[in-house]
Amino acid sequence: MTYQGPAGVETPRTIKVHESDNVAIVVNSFGLKPGTDLPDGTRLVEFVPQGHKVALTDIADGAPILRYGEVIGRAVGDIPRGAWVEESRVAMPVPPDLSALEKATRIPASLPPLEGYTFEGYRNPDGSVGTKNILAISTSVQCVAGTLDFAIKRIREDLLPRYPNVDDVVAVTHAYGCGVAIGAPQSVVPIRTLQSLATHPNFGGEVMIVSLGCEKLQPERLLPEGKEGIVRLQDEAFHGFDAMIGAILEMAEARLEVLNRRTRETVPASELVVGLQCGGSDAFSGVTANPALGYAADLLVRAGATVMFSEVTEVRDAIHLLTPRASTPEVADALIREMAWYDDYLEKGGADRSANPSPGNKKGGLANVVEKALGSVAKSGSSAIAGVLAPGEKVKQKGLIFAATPASDFVCGTLQLASGMTLQVFSTGRGTPYGLSAAPVIKVATRTDLARRWHDLIDLDAGRIATGEATIEEVGWDLFRLMLDVASGKVKPWSDKWGLFNALTLFNPAPIT
């Protein structure tokens, strides 16, 4: 990656990622006007907004447009040197052929172990470690969500003050459970997700389900074997709404008493399970925040922790860069399996990969999903990919894991939680107040402009990389240390301070009846 031009508001500044690239992105906050001379001798022939691409050479009609050293598209018409390479001038290339990928051919060597790093976490009987101490109450059907919301308000007001060691009580609600083809092959995805969520490490093993009673998804399917903890609202013992609420509160209090005895203890950093995600991405995502996340991911892997990256549609067009990094051919095959499954899923829905990126992504300089994917996979760092999870599967190994999810922020967050993620790092260029109640979310800005404007929503500024004030390595270390402090409860990310939490959103590819 080369930075052209010294830092400064008035000095033209661009970023070229790879020596073979024929475009660079503009760093200056308000873009660059026609006639501006870049340090490499390129003179702009038109205005180029911040984050958008400028042609560094003449690019002929149909010729490849290169960023990250990869083809992100082909020129639509001749593009002169110094022109704005905006979306309409970029024809999207075909995706990598899944049948012709290298498998485990360039497995990265193991990096030196990183020892001595710890955090203060909640050790569970099953050996997992939580970063929060939460009473979670799951539902088996949407019909009871309103009743549970009422009960949780009462729990917070009447019970929670008596149990100061419990961080919160949260509802794990969803739109599944009835009116669905529960025996359809793809119903395994939402059911597995709910089963996994019920045993999340931050919930301390105190499973509790509120059920209606007549739904297709019977609540016993959400409880681990040998566990009890179901309140059925249709139970004939309940005479009226107040009795139902009383039963929920009684069961909740028994669990609050257990959770209140949980205390933080010093545990090695290897007990962390971190999820990486990006949302509201822009052209800086792949050169500032995501590489810093990738560097921090390598540090976590060196410390023996578990790191998950996701978002199938934002990996698909860069899959040829990942299968060679798979630790075994079997892991590479699993990566290909998840890409193929999603290709088929989109085709059956009459959609394709051109539906991504969003209008906001495009405004931030991303021309298409190929360019977005190449920046997105930077979150994975440089470690070998140790395993692959289907949507909603629990993680059972250490190292770098691909957890297959849609790119939707809320669905991805829900599925990473189901896989066991206890802390999430979320990079953003356009900005989003996204958060999760079940696990802390660290927000990393790709641009200093955003970090300053959203000073009470962004936890870490990676935009310093674009201006040359910090290196990827320095921001990666800052993030690594911040993760340990947040996991320990020493630092609250802004989403926790404000209580900005999105509802969980199941991925349900099965039919609705």
Image: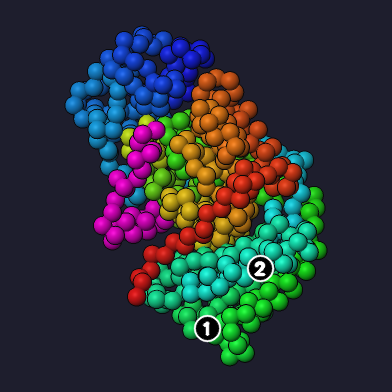
User: Helix, strand, or loop for circle 1?
Assistant: loop
Q: Is residue 266 left or right of residue 74?
A: right
With respect to residue 365, does 397 lie above or below? below
Disc 2 versus disc 1: distance between alpha carbons?
Answer: 23 Å
Seen from the viewer's position, the closer of residues 385 and 447 is: 447
Badge 1 is on which residue?
Answer: 213
With respect to residue 202, does 176 lie above or below? below
Amino acid at dot 2: Arg
Q: In this view of the protein, can residue 175 be seen by the observer?
A: yes
Residue 146 percent location from the top left of the image:
53, 70
Mark 1 packing: few (<14 Cα in 10 Å), some, or many (20+)?
some
Q: Which picture quadrant has residue 208?
A: bottom right
Q: Is residue 388 magenta?
A: no
Query: Tags 2 and 1 in contact by the CB under 8 Å rule?
Result: no
Badge 2 is on which residue?
Answer: 154
Seen from the viewer's position, the closer of residues 259 and 306 is: 259
Q: Residue at x 21, y 30 (%)?
A: 76
Residue 269 percent location from the top left of the image:
71, 46
Q: Residue at x 27, y 14 (%)?
A: 45
User: Range of the magenta residues?
Assistant: 337-364
Secondary structure, magenta segment, majority class? helix
Q: Which picture quadrant has residue 461?
A: top right
With respect to residue 497, does 21 lie above or below? above
Quadrant assignment for the C terminus: bottom left
Residue that protrudes farthest toward the bottom in the picture: 236
User: Helix, strand, or loop for circle 2?
Assistant: helix
Seen from the viewer's position, the closer of residues 64 and 204 is: 204
Amino acid at dot 1: Gly
Seen from the viewer's position, the closer of residues 439 and 286 is: 439
Residue 497 percent location from the top left of the image:
65, 46
Residue 399 percent location from the top left of the image:
61, 48
